[in-house]
Image (cartoon, grey):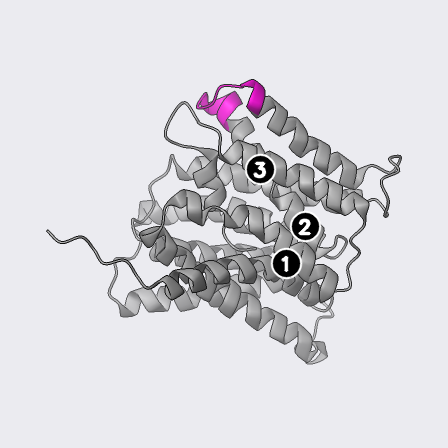
Amino acid sequence: MEAEARPPVWMTLLAFAIIYLVWGSTYLAIRVGVHEVPPFLLASMRFLVAGAILLAWVIARRERLPTLRQWVSISLLSIFFFLLDYGLIFWAEQRVASGVTAVVMATIPVFIALLEIVFLRARKLTFRLAFALLMGIGGVAILMNRSLSAGGAPIDRVGIVAILAAAMSWAVATIFTRKVELPLSKMVNSGAQMFVGGIFLGLAAFALGEFRGFHLSGVSREAWLALVYLIVAGSIFAFTAYLWLLDHESPTKVGTYAYVNPVVAVVVGYFLGGETLGPRTILGTLLILFSVVMITTARAKKPAPAAKAAAEALES
């Protein structure tokens, strides 16, 4: 049997550029949008539309839709992945810079590693892993600490706590993903989760009263463009590039975007969003990214490494 021909180099480079740059820049798009559209409502609009488009695509291709049992699993995961994770991210970006949000969300592998150590027993707490965990915690502490003279104002604590809760929610959902029955097709699975997640976010927006006093006519062109960018570039194009790369490159290579996205978000936020980039942000970012690299390259006792989980941390 002949080996499958490798795709052209330019296609691979383009796909990597998309997941690096697009997913890294979505954090600024979120911040632009939540200045004018209530956060849970904006998140609902993003994922309802993106999920509907992906589901329409798989239906047109006559792929098999989820079974009833799989819909139950999808609904459970959507609560953690979308209602809690993205809902809190969108809410927190009203208070926290987009670059810092991306950096703190990079702690997802830290939480996954802790869950693997404490609950799954899939990891052993080695010196390397303990050191990496401390570095990640130290990076977050530097961003939040008001007494530390590190240059630059400390980040809003409530916002940071919300982002940490979002990262923990994603980590918990990642663990659940290994235990529940889901569609084999990544496109079906993701489209269904986005769509159901969008429904949950819409219900949360209604419960929180975000529809009261909100008028579509009052939303500026910039906010609408940010939403379109999140839907088309962040949730459709980038995710398609991500799935394509998983079929042609190793998960370790694809997972490098987990390190690159926060850096892109910080740079984009600084140059295009007017966000500050002081010594505190730089030091906290370096410590967190150092922690993530050490954790995701460490070996697990079982073939369920945090590197793979981090690589599945979808666009924000």
Do the residues under discs 1 and 2 have CB atoms within 8 angstroms? yes
Residue that numbered label 1 is attached to: 27
Task: Residue 222: say if magenta.
Answer: no
Residue at image position (43%, 26%) is 300
- The extreme front residue here reads 9
Depicted 234 relative to depicted 182: above or below: below
Res 292 seen here:
yes
For the residue pair 132 and 78, the one nearer the viewer reads as 132
The three-letter code of the residue at mark 1 reads Tyr
Q: Quadrant of residue 4?
A: bottom left
- Indicate which disc residue 305 carries: none
Q: CA separation, marks 1 and 2? A: 7 Å
Q: Is residue 68 left or right of residue 23?
A: left
Residue at image position (61%, 61%) is 25
Q: Is residue 62 left or right of residue 171?
A: left
Residue that numbered label 2 is attached to: 101
Q: Is residue 66 left or right of residue 199?
A: left
For the residue pair 315 and 86, the one nearer the viewer reads as 315
- Label total for image: 3
Q: Residues within 10 Å of mark 3 (few under 14, many from 20)?
A: many
Do the residues under discs 2 and 3 have CB atoms within 8 angstroms? no
The three-letter code of the residue at mark 3 reads Val
Q: CA separation, marks 1 and 3? A: 19 Å
Depicted 220 relative to depicted 182: above or below: below
The three-letter code of the residue at mark 2 reads Thr
Start and end of the magenta stretch?
116-128
Residue that numbered label 3 is attached to: 292
For the residue pair 225 and 3, the one nearer the viewer reads as 3
The C terminus appears in which quarter of the rendering?
A: bottom right
